[in-house]
Amino acid sequence: MSEQRHIVPLSPSLLPGALATVERALHHTHYLDGALDALRSAVGAPGADGRAMASMAGEQIEGVAVFGLFGGTSGAGRLHFVVVEPGVRRTGVGRALANAVIAQLASTGARFVLAELPDDVDALPGARELLRAAGFMEESRIDDFFRDGVALAFMRREIEAL
C-alpha cells in the first residue's frame, strides 16, 4: 500500500484517468457501459444523486467510486460502484473508497447505503467480499435479473447517526 494514498473528489481534469481505470477494471464485463455513463454524469454534473471520488497514489488513480442519494427519498444512499485497478486489488483501496463514500453519505444525512450488485462472480470477482468487508449485508435479490444465473443482489449498510 502506498503511503501517498488519498481520497479526492473526482474533478473533470481527472476524468480521463478515471474512465481508463473503469475500463481496465470492467473491460470484459456486461457492466462497463453503465459504469462509464454513471461516472461521466457524476463528474460532468455532480449532485445529490451522483458524485465520484478517486483513490490516488501520488498522481496515479488506483480506484474510483460513484455514489449518491436515491432521488425522491429521505436519507437513502446509493453506492453505484467501486472499481480498483487490477494491480492494486486487495491492498485496501476498495475498502478505503467504500468507507469514504459511507462517510460522505453520512454527512448528508443518509441513514443507510444500498448497493445493487450484479451477483456475477466471474465478471466481478471480489465485489461481494468488498461490500461485506465494508459492513454491507444482502437484504434481498432478484434471481436471473441480468441473465440466466446472474441475480441482482441488494446489499445494504446502515449508517450510524453522526
Image: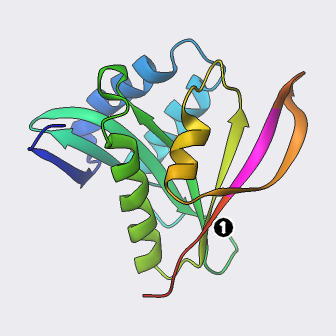
Write down the quadrant of residue 157 in the picture. Answer: bottom right
Q: Is residue 147 above or below residue 44?
A: above
Q: Which residues are magenta?
A: 151-155
Percent from the top left, x then y, of residue 102?
A: 45, 65
- The colour mode here is rainbow
**Side (left or right) of 143 relative to 52:** right
Percent from the top left, x then y, of residue 43?
A: 38, 47
Residue at x 54% of width, y 75% of height:
159
Q: Which is more toward the observer, 70 or 117?
A: 117
Q: Amino acid at mark 1?
A: Gly
Percent from the top left, x then y, of residue 144?
A: 90, 30
Mark 1 lies on a secondary structure that is loop
Residue at x 59% of width, y 26% of height:
124
**Image quadrant containing the N terminus:** top left
Q: Is residue 102 above or below residue 14?
A: below
Q: Is residue 45 above or below residue 35?
A: below
Q: Which is more toward the observer, 59 or 160?
A: 160
Residue at far top of view? 28
